[in-house]
Amino acid sequence: MRPFQIVRFALFLGLEIALCAALHFFDDWTLAEMPVRFVECAFLCGFAFLLAVSEFPSAISARRQALLFWGVAVALRLVALPIEPGDDFWRYQWE
């Protein structure tokens, strides 16, 4: 394993979770500049994801990899809970 790979992975993963948490600050699309900031933040979140994936520690056991994957998936879902879906979501559910 390369030195500091775990540290870089944790840093990029933390950055991804923080950027995903910041998305709810830009979800009021009634203001003109908010959609642009939302997309910028989402793009940076995706870029942090790609950096974290490139540093994923493959030398750990499959059980720890699964725990890490599911832990991050649950954390990202919990972070995204404050983001309210738009009206289209409820319309699609009705149809």
Image: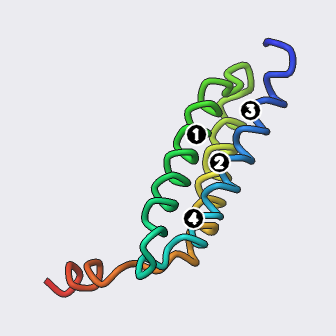
Query: Which residue is nearer to you in this view: 57 or 27?
Result: 27
Q: CA distance from mark 4 to mark 1?
A: 15 Å
- Reading the image, the residue beneath label 3 is 9
| Residue type (three-letter) at the residue carrying disc 1 | Phe
- Reading the image, the residue beneath label 2 is 16
Q: Is residue 42 left or right of residue 74?
A: left
- Reading the image, the residue beneath label 4 is 23
Q: Residue at x 68, y 45 (%)?
A: 67
Q: CA distance from mark 3 to mark 2?
A: 11 Å
Q: Give the mark nearest the N terminus, 4 or 3.
A: 3
Chosen colour scheme: rainbow
Residue 79 place in picture, x, y as percent: 63, 67
Q: Give the mark nearest the N terminus, 1 or 2.
A: 2
Residue 4 place in picture, x, y as percent: 86, 21
Residue 19 place in picture, x, y as percent: 64, 55
Q: Give the mark nearest the N terminus, 2 or 4.
A: 2
Question: Which image quadrant: the N terminus?
Answer: top right
* SS at circle 1: helix
| Residue type (three-letter) at the residue carrying disc 3 | Phe
Q: In the rendered structure, are the residues bearing label 1 and label 2 in contact, judged by CB atoms less than 8 Å apart?
A: yes
| Residue type (three-letter) at the residue carrying disc 4 | Leu
> Which of pointers 4 and 3 indicates the residue nearer the eye?
4
Q: In this rendering, is residue 2 above or below 60?
A: above
Q: CA distance from mark 2 to mark 4?
A: 11 Å
Residue 36 place in picture, x, y as percent: 45, 59
Q: Residue at x 35, y 80 (%)?
A: 86
| Residue type (three-letter) at the residue carrying disc 2 | Glu
Q: Residue at x 19, y 87 (%)?
A: 94
Q: Residue at x 65, y 48 (%)?
A: 16
Q: CA distance from mark 3 to mark 1?
A: 10 Å
Q: In the rendered structure, are the residues bearing label 4 and label 1 in contact, judged by CB atoms less than 8 Å apart?
A: no
Question: Which image quadrant: the C terminus?
Answer: bottom left
